[in-house]
Image (cartoon, rainbow, N blue to C red):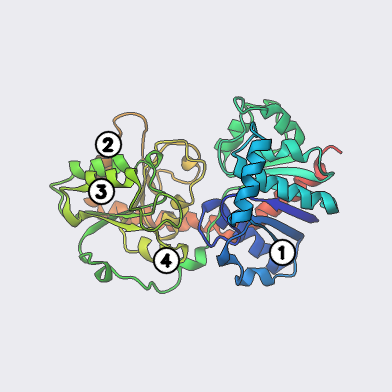
Amino acid sequence: MKIAILTSGILPIPSVQGGAVEKLIDHYLEYNHQHRLHDITVFSVLHPGVLAHPALLSDVNHYQYIDMGSFPAKIRKRLYALAHPHGYYHYSIGYYLRQAIRIIEKSNDYDCIILENRPGYALPLRHATRAKLVCHLHNDFLNAATVHGHAIYEATAGILTVSDYIRSRVQTCCPQDTKTVTVHNGIDLGSFARQPAITRQSLGLAADDFILVFSGRLIPEKGIVELIEAMHMLKDETSVSLLVMGSSFYDNASNQDDPFIAELRSKAEGLGDRIRFTGYVRHELMPDYLRLADVAVVPSTWDDPFPTTVLEGMAAGLPLITTNRGGIPEMATSRNAVVVAYPGDFVNGLARAISYLHHNARERAAMGEASLQLSRQYSKEAYAKNFFDALTRCVETATP
């Protein structure tokens, strides 16, 4: 097939600025390059870091960059905003989409257009192309409450969701749904097999410390405030330490001007160096940091669709402490995780789970081994194969 991919309009492909969605796009593009399945054009925002990236040498994956950051582009975006005051998305995303549609209309020879986490793109595209539209949903963006949700659903040939939870949310829009398919995310398991370049000693961590690791964006719904509060409840368990990896927005490594992160640091006071903030960690270094830990904590307080942070903790062979939200129970079970209910007595629940694993080394080891075994079904190769198989079925079975 000849395929176009419309991305979020915020972060670039290849994923030189990070981003979970963008990394997943990289995975299936890499698979397509290796197996030469389809002719794919990715419409991405321009970023200087992509220009010398080796992925651009592919002869089956092509990259069409849209300038969003130059001074002339900023003027054009503002003019677009004035002309389109009631767009479906923020005017910057609307401008990106308009530029992509202009290029698509010139050729109009795509068999399929993948809408990456932007179901609203389907509304203008349905009149601009004969291509089949397939949404790839990473978040709860299409449900009974979505503006024009039914029209978006009808405009698509298929909908791929990252979890059964997100699929169930789509089905509130259309209870008779027959075109939504779950394709679980995958990660680069090979990156967890190499020799780590980071040691506890290099980070000033004691060899006998009991290390918890949190990784992800530092935003309230990830449960980091509650995790720090749980650490305060464990102040007498002095060997328990927490490594907090992440920033407020992807490759923003400094975090200096973010008020929420300032609040987190303030909450961490009184525990000394038992809570360490690393800032943004490059994706290729994540496995090294994770393997320093004893337990991975993913305390999401929102309906997290299918967080790859859970998969990464599993691939590092770590037992998990997590919640019963969104798609998390589809990969975290009693075999490899202590699942804490939210809402409820959440902070106490986190503290009890940490203390339990701290004092039960045998259970910890068994859960870590289960995590490692379960992680093997979530390779990036399996994800990409399942993605393209599901995409092909959607296009072939779609009503003309």
Q: Residue at x 47, y 42 (%)?
A: 328
Can residue 166 be seen by looking at this rendering? Answer: yes
Q: Are marks 4 and 3 in contact (CB under 8 Å)?
A: no
- From mark 4 to mark 3, how far is it between C-alphas? 23 Å
In the rendered image, which quarter contains the N terminus? bottom right
Q: Amino acid at mark 3?
A: Arg
Q: Position of residue 130 (x, y in %)?
A: 85, 44
Mark before the other along the chain sequence, 4 or 2: 4
- Discs 4/2, front: 4
- From mark 1 to mark 2, how far is it between C-alphas? 47 Å
| Residue 105 versus residue 284 in the image, above or below | above
Q: Residue at x 59, y 62 (%)?
A: 14
Mark before the other along the chain sequence, 1 or 4: 1
Q: Amino acid at mark 2?
A: Val
- The residue tagged 3 is 265
- The residue tagged 1 is 61
Mark drawn on residue 285 = 4
